[in-house]
Image (cartoon, rainbow, N blue to C red):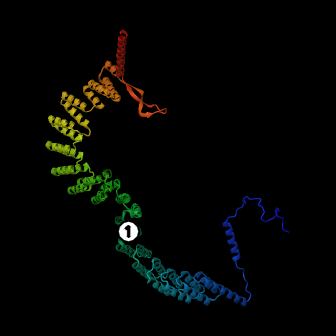
């Protein structure tokens, strides 16, 4: 009987779910799918069937064949179904049917390696040798590049002790010139047969067909294994002759190790050295370690030292490969070669080093680089004594440096000094002349003038300094060195005239140097009036505080007082304070107690003051103020007090006149 509407147990439209909370045991979609698959697998297991008589067997075979035929009819390209069908027929001892199925499958896809292997496996497993041979002959003609068929074919004949047949198979295989492994299998087969001469001939054909490093090593290993050291050595030498640059460090290591096993230590050492010379430095790390180990065991002291040097060479070469413009490494490398003393290697190293020119046209990147050239030139001059080569190095250096962008005064000076040492003064002068024309650096003029001064050519020095002033008229050094020259030779009037020309220049980079030299010139000649005039002339052009301080050393208090007055008018309190501080210093050094006390009283005091910020307003719209530190001078206070007394007197006189009226 159906429950009534609204009943608590009904499942109709009005049924209510009382508990809507999630189940604590949640089941995912993945779990549902996995469970479904597991159940399908359990259901797919076929039940075991017991066959009682021949009729049931025939019915079973008919049904099974129909199932296989239906499958391959639907999936003709599925080779796995064909293989299962054929293997089932073979399991029923129906080999003719099985062969027929395999042949039908080969018509579908004759290039399927797995299909051929299953077919061959069936024939060999059931000892149908001739059938297997026929199959092998067919497959190696259809698929000659599949090594697996050749392997199995030859192995089957070898198992059957048909060595001639196996050799024939190998020969047919080698006509296709396969990879390394088939050749090695053929060699091993001949070794198993005890036919060493035939194995040797196979190896020779292999090396002729594939002349590689590995092939030669295998040939040499074979000959050494069978105690034929002469043929093994000949194989190593032939590989060096034929392959040359294709050989790597492993080959030479094996060659040297072979000679060690033959007790030919000198040959092994020669091989190591040859390999280290031939191979690139970055590709011979293992070879070098083997050489070091060899020399430690069999070498003498000189050989070990050479090994150490070669190791350092190798380290430098590795660093250079990583960064060919690491000039510090080149410096170390050159020093190493110079310590050995091989001039050819030293020169070669220098040439390689200077070949790595900096790629950026900025002077700071060239500073280390030019020293390689300088050391190269000094090496040619001082160690080899080849003057022409040293001159050629300097000439090449001058061509490399981009003088229009930047130059180095050092290289011009060194080149000129080199020519002076060779007593070629005209060459040295031409070098300096070329330097002045190309780079016009300050140092060039000074070095050139120094050379002529040492030679006693004063007129040439004047010419050089004149050119210096022409090129660098704003450089105070150009004026001062010229003045020093005239002063040193006693031409005071010429020196004074130069100073006057210098101080009257409208533009000078550091004029204080020229003024100082002018004043020192007058003081050294005890022309104090002239010196005082120069000071006055300087103060007329500059009112810098340091000028007053320097002048105070000459005129003492008067200069400081003048400075005080000047800076007071300009309201420059900090400069006034500096002058008073210097005055106190002078009084302490040269004055008495009274003057020291007076100078101390004049010293200002630092105090905090307020001033209005121009254009600034505070939070309330009124003027904004800022605090600053300033100096308070007692002299200013006394003057302000005197002004107040005069103002009070003036006011008293005014009131008295008004009362009398």
Give x and y (percent) for residue 309.
35, 58
The reply to whether residue 490 is visible in this rendering is: no
Pick the residue in front: 62 or 152. 62
Q: Which residue is mark 1?
A: 264
Residue at the limit of the structure toward the right, as seen here: 1
Q: Quadrant of the N terminus?
A: bottom right
Image-quadrant location for residue 542: top left
Instruction: Report which quarter residue 40 is drawn in.
Output: bottom right
Q: Where residue 380 sits: x, y (%)?
A: 24, 55
Task: Answer above or below: position of 172 versus 503.
Answer: below
Whether residue 495 sits left or right of residue 121 in the image: it is left
Residue at 23% across / 36% down in the picture? 514
Where disc 1 sits, the SS reads: loop
At 19% from the left edge and 27% from the top edge, which residue is drawn? 529
Q: Residue at x 22, y 57 (%)?
A: 392
Q: Residues within 10 Å of mark 1 (few under 14, many from 20)?
A: few
Residue in front for this viewpoint, 225 or 432: 432
Q: Residue furthest front?
A: 661
Percent position of residue 345, x then y:
29, 60
Give x and y (percent) for residue 185: 48, 79
């Amino acid at each position: 009987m159906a429950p009534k509407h609204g009943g608590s147990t009904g499942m109709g439209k009005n049924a209510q779910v009382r508990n809507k909370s999630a189940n604590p045991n949640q089941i995912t979609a993945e779990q549902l799918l996995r469970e479904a698959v597991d159940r399908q697998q359990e259901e797919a297991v076929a039940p075991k069937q017991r066959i009682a008589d021949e009729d049931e067997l025939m019915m079973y075979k008919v049904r099974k064949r129909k199932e296989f035929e239906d499958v391959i009819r639907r999936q003709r390209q599925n080779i796995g179904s064909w293989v299962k069908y054929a293997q089932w027929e073979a399991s029923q001892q129906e080999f003719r049917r099985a062969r027929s199925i395999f042949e039908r499958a080969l018509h579908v896809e004759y290039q399927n390696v797995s299909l051929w292997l299953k077919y061959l496996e069936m024939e060999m497993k059931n000892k149908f040798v001739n059938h297997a041979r026929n199959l092998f002959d067919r497959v190696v003609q259809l698929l000659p590049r599949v090594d697996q068929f050749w392997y199995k074919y030859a192995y089957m004949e070898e198992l059957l002790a048909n060595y001639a047949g196996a050799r024939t198979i190998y020969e047919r295989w080698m006509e296709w010139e396969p990879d390394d492994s088939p050749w090695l299998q053929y060699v091993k087969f001949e070794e198993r047969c005890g036919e060493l001469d035939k194995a040797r001939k196979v190896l020779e054909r292999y090396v002729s067909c594939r002349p590689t490093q590995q092939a030669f090593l295998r040939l040499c290993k074979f000959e050494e294994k069978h105690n034929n050291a002469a043929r093994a050595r000949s194989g190593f030498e032939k590989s060096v002759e034929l392959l040359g640059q294709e050989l790597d460090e492993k080959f030479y290591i094996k060659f040297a190790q072979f000679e060690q096993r033959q007790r030919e230590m000198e040959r092994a050492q020669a091989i190591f050295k040859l390999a280290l010379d031939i191979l690139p430095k970055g590709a011979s790390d293992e070879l070098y370690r083997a050489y070091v180990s060899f020399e430690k065991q069999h070498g003498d002291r000189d050989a070990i030292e050479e090994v150490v040097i070669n190791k350092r060479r190798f380290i430098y070469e590795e660093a250079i490969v990583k960064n060919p413009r690491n000039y510090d490494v080149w410096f170390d490398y050159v020093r190493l070669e110079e310590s050995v003393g091989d001039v050819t290697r030293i020169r070669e190293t220098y040439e390689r080093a200077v070949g790595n020119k900096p790629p950026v046209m900025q002077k700071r990147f060239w500073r280390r680089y030019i020293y390689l050239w300088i050391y190269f030139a000094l090496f040619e001059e001082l160690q080899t004594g080849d003057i022409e080569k040293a001159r050629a190095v300097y000439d090449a250096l001058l061509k490399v440096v981009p003088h229009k962008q930047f130059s180095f005064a050092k290289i011009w000076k060194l080149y000129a000094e080199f020519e002076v040492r060779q007593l070629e003064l005209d060459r040295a002068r031409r070098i300096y002349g070329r330097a002045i024309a190309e780079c016009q650096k300050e140092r060039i003029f000074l070095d050139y003038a120094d050379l002529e001064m040492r030679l006693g050519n004063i007129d040439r020095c004047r010419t050089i300094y004149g050119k210096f002033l022409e090129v660098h008229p704003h450089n105070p050094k150009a004026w001062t060195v010229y003045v020093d020259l005239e002063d040193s030779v006693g031409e005071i009037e010429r020196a004074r005239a130069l100073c006057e020309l210098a101080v009257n220049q409208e533009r000078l980079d550091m004029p204080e140097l020229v003024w100082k030299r002018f004043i020192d010139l007058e003081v050294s000649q005890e022309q104090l009036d002239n010196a005082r005039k120069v000071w006055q002339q300087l103060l007329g052009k500059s009112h810098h505080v340091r000028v007053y301080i320097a002048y105070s050393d000459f005129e003492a208090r008067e200069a400081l007082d003048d400075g005080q007055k000047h800076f007071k008018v300009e309201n420059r309190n900090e400069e006034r304070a500096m002058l008073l501080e210097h005055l106190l210093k002078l009084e302490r050094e040269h004055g008495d107690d009274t003057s020291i006390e007076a100078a101390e009283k004049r010293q200002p005091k630092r105090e905090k003051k307020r001033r209005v910020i121009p254009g600034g307003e505070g939070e309330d719209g009124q003027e904004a103020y800022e605090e600053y530190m300033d100096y308070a001078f007692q002299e200013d206070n006394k003057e302000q007090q005197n002004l107040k007394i005069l103002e009070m007197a003036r006011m008293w006189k005014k009131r008295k006149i008004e009362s009398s009226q």
